[in-house]
Image (cartoon, helix red, strand yellow):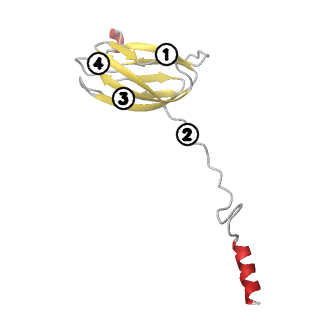
């Protein structure tokens, strides 16, 4: 009788095979897509972006002041606006923004630099929306 009980106990513990003690794996949610990295070089009264085309989504801007004056970068459009800190010559900064379809203005908000030509526009996606 003891042998029968031992055999029944071993069978109940499942000595291997499908679902042996682990059970089915719990479903996991997919990871969030990584932000697209963009570099913006700010020289004296010019903005150079590392890419020319944009699709809606998350972006991480690295802003580098390669000029001789303080500069910053502001992005303004249908997805809102975001701005870097003011950067001294040689400094870098970073900010994240989610871009939606439409037209965005990128400019330096420091001391009238925008009026001196330190601005550019990008179009995100296919639609062009005013703001």
Nearer to the camera, 22 or 58: 22
Vertical arrangement, residue 112 with respect to residue 28, above or below: above
Residue at mark 2? 32
On the rendered image, what quadrant is the C terminus found in? top right
Label 3, secondary structure: give it. Answer: loop
- The residue at 77%/90% (across/down) is 1
Residue 85 at least partly seen? no
Residue at image location 51% in from the left, 17% down from the top: 53
Q: Which residue is mark 3?
A: 84
Distance (Cα) linking label 3 and label 4 = 15 Å
**Residue drawn at 29 percent across, 18 percent down:** 111
> How packed is label 3: few (under 14 Cα within 10 Å), some, or many (20 or more)?
many
Tell me the tag on residue 111. Answer: 4
> In which image quadrant can residue 60 be found?
top left
Mark nearest the camera among 4 and 1 is: 1
Q: Residue at image x 75%, y 79%?
A: 8
> Residue furthest toward the bottom?
1
Residue 58, x across and y down, in percent: 51, 31
Task: Give the mark nearest the N terminus, 4 or 1.
Answer: 4
Q: In what element is the residue under mark 4?
A: loop
* 3D distance between C-alphas at marks 2 and 4: 38 Å
Per the image, the residue denoted by label 1 is: 122
Q: Quadrant of residue 78?
A: top right
Distance of label 2 from label 3 (alpha carbons) = 24 Å
**Label 4: few (<14), some or many (≥20) within 10 Å?**
few
Q: Which of label 2 and label 3 is nearer to you?
A: 2
Mark 2 or mark 4: whose residue is earlier in sequence: 2
Q: Which mark is residue 41?
A: none
Q: Is residue 108 above or below residue 12?
A: above
Kindly check if marks 3 and 4 are in contact, taking CB atoms under 8 A apart as contact. Answer: no
User: Are circles 2 and 4 on residues that touch, CB within 8 Å?
Assistant: no
């Amino acid at each position: 009788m003891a042998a029968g009980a031992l055999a029944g106990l071993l069978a109940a513990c499942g000595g291997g095979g499908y679902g042996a003690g682990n059970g089915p794996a719990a479903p996991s949610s997919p990871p969030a897509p990584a932000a697209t990295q963009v570099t913006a070089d700010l020289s004296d009264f010019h903005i150079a972006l590392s890419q020319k085309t944009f699709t809606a989504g998350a972006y991480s801007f690295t802003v580098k002041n390669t000029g001789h004056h303080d500069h910053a970068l502001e992005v303004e459009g249908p997805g809102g606006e975001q701005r870097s800190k003011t950067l001294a010559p040689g400094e870098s900064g970073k900010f994240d923004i989610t871009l939606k379809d439409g037209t965005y203005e990128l400019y330096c908000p420091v001391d009238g630099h925008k009026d001196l030509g330190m601005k550019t526009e990008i179009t995100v996606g296919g639609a062009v929306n005013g703001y």
